[in-house]
Image (spheres, coloured by chain):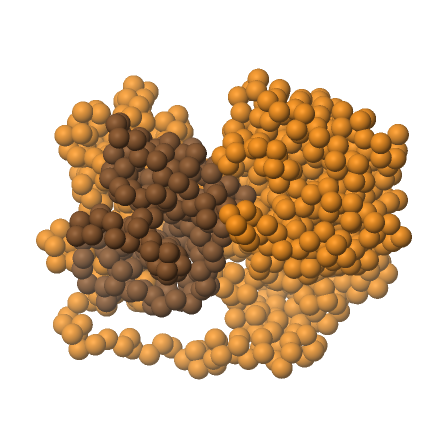
């Protein structure tokens, strides 16, 4: 029998057509699970498979699209999958077709959305798909076909699960919308980067539209992919005729349009909804004389996120460096407190300032990095759609983060020492990342460009041995401090040029090191960046919030002809006019605000975030201590707003706006604290969660916001949180208060269970409850210590009972 | 007319109903001046017009009991039975704005709850608006046949439990056709989505009776 991988390599491969269409014709009812037909109507299923083999299909998919543990019990799942694969094999034997025939284990979406938008955890999804793939392999499938996936993260879970559970070839096909993107936003280029990295044997697209309408997406795949591309479109668009659904592209047109895709380079072709054996027969006839276009390996270095791809070169890529605790006291404290909102704000600011990637580093000695790094990655992904650079030297943290990331990440970093390469390259290979390789080794950093080039060459040889492609390596030419050695920067710049010219590999530099120990560091860094870009630097790791750096970057692009009509530079200049260097003018305030309120209090009461932050900075500059600013301005302003709210003079939105403003001011004060200075009075830790089974979190988020604005150390566990998780966090923080929220009557039992568990296992912690369905009476009935009717009440409870137990 | 599954796209670019949005955001009323509503409307501008997936099924209202059957669905609800009185058919539908709105809300949830709240409200207004546009269009199609479309009725209204959601999802093939998924607690992702039934009955019937 022909080997499947050889078939993929050598021939135009025919897939099958629609299955639902045929089963419906045989009597499958709307709402009935098609997979159960493998057991109840095996003859109909086998006949459909056989019709495709007779029509010329090489690969026919088992009727297992929805066969997973979310829809079937363990025993039933095994039966459905075993029967499903067996029916394809029987059909292959029964068919007289002379072509090589293969049975695919078909895997569709789980039916649930992954976190953070839905409630299915990524690793649970991996397990779910691994289970289905393993059963398919045990049942004798020749390959796995993952298809109709409309979410990038779920596609990754499925591919990872299939690869970890079996050695079978895996084909991956996504369903694109009319806008040429997946439902959750991924572009074709982003999907190609991620799926190739993770080791898919062929990738492509199915469902959604007809072949002509899907052709533009197929072309994007062909332009980016180094593996065979598959194409399984619908028979056009459905329309209703006499109460029946018919598709608007008939077999002959379908075959002609699909043949165009084959001429463009598609190598596996079939049909999806609305297509029948007649379509496949027409397709085989139409393409019989065509020679498949060879797959050209692509050499661009590409990373991707949940939405888009970023390619390195020729335009230099900016990697934001600010998600890194080195030298940042407030960041370290945020990590210790597991306060992710600090990190999220930094992420968003860098994206707004123009970063193309975000470097994520949470390495502090006191933290559990293998737990913290993937969590930071997950959180950053909810606010930013930039590709990430996973920055750690801890292999366990690196692997955990590589799993959690949505897209193809960059790894920061490997170096030329054997120990580093042995540790990092297997992870880079398995998870399909690109990697920054430092041009140093066991002996240290070579003082010459030739020395660094030699290390780069050795790293390339070693990478090949590990199966890491050359295009996935970016070399860091290593920025050294120019005040320590006159030739330091010159050597770095020469290394950039040599690596580009001799090896053709992309390069990266961390920029700011160059000016260490010198005055006017920003200007020095900007000049160095400009020179490095002149040498063909592919990427810079820098602070995108530095105006000097960004001006140098934008100017360099314009001068190199990489900024059409200087549009980028002009936009940058408009956002950062030179006049901005003049100290800010007095704030504009209407006459009604003129009455005597100190400006910071006024800003908080009016809910002006930026204004409040600016006023807090100003107060610090004037010599006030953070503590006095909090006590004399923030707390009184919040109290006044809270009182007005309770008196019905202000409404929830104003209360929230004020809290946001206070929090912004608070952030400035925290950031200003230095060792030895007066600490912000540490309010007690409070754990908040929406209980298991409940996904409503607006009210809980308001409580969090208000508690944080009052300086409480809030750990927000999110929504749908199991009791055990809440207990673990309460114990970790030794929190005297835990707040639980529930909106639906159906989830109050989960709340009662959580209260009971906390009282039994963490008697030091008092539990307050709130949410639409609760009342004081109800709260007492389920054993809660307190009922918070609203967010202000929650603040009062925590303030009154701080550490009291 | 019955049986076939149809997908109707509602175009983007309908006017915003600011009053309705504020009604969702401020159920207790209050001064909206302080809110960054216009900023949030700009953020949501690209969030799309919505898609409605639907099919028409025959209604069967047995004289006894509180169950209603709509095509293959068996729905335990006295309130729905009342809402479908006199209807020979019903539209079963699912509508969604898609993921963009959820992405926006997730982004602002942690950094500005006020904006997240407003985006929730904007999404709620958008999806209801899309359904209104859909219903108006369907009503126009039904009128020449002497039929009218009754108000929508969703799982979770009255005594129609959320537990019927999986049946509706299966009937409409929501996951595949709309990318709509159900969580364990039977809520939908994308979150700005609605499932509903709406009766169809002869225009003369039930005249003068209070609409539900």
**Total marks in image:** 0
| Residue A438 image position (x, y, % from top left) | 73, 51
What is the letter of the orange chain?
A: A
Q: Nearest the camera: A35 or A274?
A: A274
Residue A366 seen in the current view = no
Q: Which residue is painted at 34% across and 66% down in the image?
A: B16
**Which chain has been coloured brown in this picture?**
B
Residue A524, image x, y percentages? 61, 70
- The residue shown at (61%, 22%) is A39
Which residue is found at the position 63% from the left and 46% from the top? A274
Q: Can residue A241 be seen in this view?
A: yes
x, y percent for residue A575? 48, 75
**Picture coordinates of residue B96 (x, y %)?**
43, 51
Does residue A305 lie above or below A614 as drawn? above
On screen, A229 above or below A134? below
Residue nearest the observer in this picture, A443 or B166: B166
């Amino acid at each position: 029998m022909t080997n499947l991988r050889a078939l993929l390599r050598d021939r135009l491969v025919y897939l099958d057509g629609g299955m639902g269409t045929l089963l419906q014709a045989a009597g499958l009812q709307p709402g009935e699970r098609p997979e159960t037909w493998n057991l109840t109507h095996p003859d109909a299923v086998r006949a459909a498979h056989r019709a495709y083999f007779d029509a010329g299909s090489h690969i026919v998919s088992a009727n297992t699209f929805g066969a997973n543990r979310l829809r079937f019990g363990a025993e039933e799942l095994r039966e459905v999958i075993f029967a499903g694969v067996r029916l394809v094999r029987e059909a292959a034997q029964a068919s007289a077709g002379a072509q090589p025939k293969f049975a695919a284990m078909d895997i569709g979406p789980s039916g649930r959305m992954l976190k953070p938008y839905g409630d299915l955890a990524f690793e649970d999804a991996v397990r779910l798909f691994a289970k289905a793939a393993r059963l398919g392999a045990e049942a004798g499938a020749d390959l796995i076909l993952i298809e109709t996936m409309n979410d990038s993260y779920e596609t990754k879970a499925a591919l990872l699960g299939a690869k970890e559970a079996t050695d079978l070839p895996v084909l991956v096909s996504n369903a694109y919308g009319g806008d040429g993107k997946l439902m959750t936003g991924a572009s074709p280029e982003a999907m190609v980067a991620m799926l190739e990295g993770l080791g898919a044997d062929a990738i492509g697209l199915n469902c959604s539209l007809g072949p002509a309408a899907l052709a533009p997406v197929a072309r994007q795949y062909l332009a980016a992919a180094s593996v065979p591309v598959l194409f399984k479109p619908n028979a056009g668009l459905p329309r209703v005729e006499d109460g029946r659904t018919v598709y608007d592209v008939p077999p002959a047109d379908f075959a002609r349009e699909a043949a165009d895709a084959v001429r463009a380079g598609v190598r596996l072709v079939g049909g999806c909804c609305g297509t029948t054996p007649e379509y496949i027969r027409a397709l085989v006839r139409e393409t019989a004389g065509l020679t498949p276009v060879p797959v050209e390996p692509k050499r661009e270095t590409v990373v991707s996120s949940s939405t888009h791809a970023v390619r390195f070169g020729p335009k230099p890529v900016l990697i934001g460096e600010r998600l890194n605790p080195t030298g940042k006291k407030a960041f370290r404290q945020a990590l210790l407190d597991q306060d992710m909102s600090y990190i999220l704000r930094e992420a968003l600011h860098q994206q707004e300032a123009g970063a193309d990637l975000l470097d994520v580093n949470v390495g502090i000695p006191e933290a559990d990095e293998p737990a913290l790094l993937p969590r930071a990655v997950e959180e950053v992904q909810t606010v930013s759609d930039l590709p990430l650079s996973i920055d750690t030297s801890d292999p366990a943290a690196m692997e955990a983060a590589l799993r959690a990331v949505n897209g193809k990440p960059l790894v920061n970093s490997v170096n030329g020492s054997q120990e580093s390469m042995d540790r990092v390259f297997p992870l880079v290979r398995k998870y399909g990342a690109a990697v920054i390789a430092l041009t140093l080794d066991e002996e240290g950093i070579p003082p010459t460009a030739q020395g660094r080039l030699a290390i780069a060459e050795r790293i390339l040889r070693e990478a090949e041995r590990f199966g890491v492609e050359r295009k996935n390596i970016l070399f860091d030419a290593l920025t050294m401090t120019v005040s320590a050695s006159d030739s330091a920067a010159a050597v770095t710049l020469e290394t950039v040029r040599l690596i580009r010219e001799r090896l053709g590999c992309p390069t990266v530099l961390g920029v700011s090191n160059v000016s260490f120990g010198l005055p006017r560091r920003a200007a020095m860094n900007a000049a160095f960046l400009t020179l490095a870009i002149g040498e063909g630097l592919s990427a810079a790791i820098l602070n995108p919030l530095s105006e000097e750096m960004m001006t140098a970057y934008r100017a360099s692009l314009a001068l190199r002809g990489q900024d059409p009509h200087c549009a980028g530079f002009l936009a940058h200049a408009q956002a950062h006019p030179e006049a901005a260097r003049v100290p800010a003018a007095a704030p504009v305030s209407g006459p009604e605000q003129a009455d005597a309120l100190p400006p910071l209090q006024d800003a908080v009461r009016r809910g002006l975030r930026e204004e409040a932050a600016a006023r807090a900075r100003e107060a610090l500059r004037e010599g006030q201590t953070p503590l006095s600013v909090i006590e004399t301005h923030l707390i009184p302003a919040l109290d006044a707003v809270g009182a007005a709210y309770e008196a019905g003079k202000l409404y929830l939105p104003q209360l929230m706006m004020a809290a946001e403003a206070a929090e912004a001011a608070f952030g400035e004060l925290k950031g200003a604290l230095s060792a030895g200075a007066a600490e912000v009075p540490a309010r007690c830790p409070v754990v908040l969660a929406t209980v298991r089974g409940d996904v409503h979190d607006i009210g809980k988020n308001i409580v969090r916001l208000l508690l944080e604005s009052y300086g409480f150390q809030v750990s927000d566990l999110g929504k749908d949180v199991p009791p055990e998780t809440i207990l673990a966090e309460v114990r970790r923080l030794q929190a005297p208060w835990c707040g639980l929220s529930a909106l639906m009557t159906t989830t109050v039992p989960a709340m009662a269970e959580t209260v009971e568990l906390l009282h039994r296992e963490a008697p030091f912690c008092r539990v307050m409850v709130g949410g639409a369905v609760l009342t004081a009476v109800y709260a007492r009935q389920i054993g809660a210590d307190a009922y918070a009717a609203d967010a202000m009440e929650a603040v009062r409870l925590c303030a009154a009972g701080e550490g009291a137990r | 007319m019955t049986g076939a599954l149809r997908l109707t796209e509602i175009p983007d670019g309908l006017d915003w109903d600011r009053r309705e949005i504020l009604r969702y955001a401020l159920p207790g009323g209050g001064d909206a001046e302080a809110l960054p509503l216009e900023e949030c409307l700009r953020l949501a501008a690209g969030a799309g017009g919505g898609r409605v997936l639907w099919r028409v099924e025959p209604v069967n209202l047995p004289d006894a009991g509180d169950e209603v059957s709509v095509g293959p669905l068996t729905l335990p609800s006295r309130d729905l039975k009342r809402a479908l009185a006199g209807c020979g058919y019903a539209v079963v539908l699912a509508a969604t704005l898609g993921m963009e709105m959820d992405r926006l809300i997730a982004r602002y949830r942690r950094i500005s709850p006020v904006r997240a709240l407003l985006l929730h409200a904007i999404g709620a207004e958008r999806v209801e608006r899309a359904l209104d546009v859909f219903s108006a269009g369907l009503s126009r199609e039904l009128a020449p046949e002497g039929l009218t479309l009754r108000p929508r009725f969703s799982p979770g209204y009255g005594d129609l439990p959320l537990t019927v959601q999986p049946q509706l999802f299966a009937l409409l093939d929501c996951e595949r056709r709309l990318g709509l998924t159900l969580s364990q607690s039977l809520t939908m992702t994308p979150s700005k989505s609605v499932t509903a039934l709406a009766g169809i009955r002869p225009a003369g019937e039930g005249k003068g009776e209070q609409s539900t």
